[in-house]
Amino acid sequence: MRLVAWIIRIVLFALLFVLALRNTDDATLQLFFGAVWHAPLILILLAAFGLGIVAGLAAIAPGLMRQRMEVARLRRALNDARAKAPAGPPNPGGHPPPEAQVSSKVPYNVIGPSGPRV
């Protein structure tokens, strides 16, 4: 699978490189207030792509920060609840609690079975 991913990356890089080499002619970008930018077309395309990335990150940043604050709040509440829980006898049957069975190496965003559990 990694080999296929690397082949796709190499092919994509080669296609973008050829695109860049074929679009080196000067282009004129008419900006606001009479400003004009003369640059190679590929540079203008790269700048537009970069601005799109920045705009996309700026659009998702508030939601991402809100989620991180909520996760931190829930972790604090969980730690407080565990600290206040009485230390009673172990579970009947001698099995560990379900949260102890989950491996700490499993990422949070995995959907479906995460492999064999011990």
Image: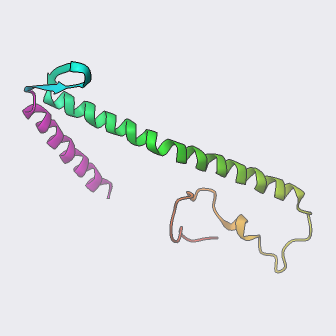
Q: Is residue 35 visible?
A: no
Which quadrant holds the C terminus?
bottom right
In percent of width and height, residue 82 lies at 83, 58
Nearer to the camera, 83 or 40: 40
Q: Which residues are magenta?
A: 1-24
81, above or below 67, in the image? below
Return the residue found at the far bottom: 93
As drawn, is 69 to the left or to the right of 61?
A: right
In percent of width and height, residue 27 lies at 11, 26
Count how many numbered circles sit on residues in the image: 0
Residue drawn at point x = 11 percent, y = 37 percent: 18
Q: Is residue 23 visible?
A: yes
- Taking the magenta stretch, the answer to whether it contains residue 105 is no
In percent of width and height, residue 116 lies at 56, 71
Nearer to the camera, 7 or 20: 20
25, above or below 66, in the image? above
Picture quadrant where residue 33 is located: top left
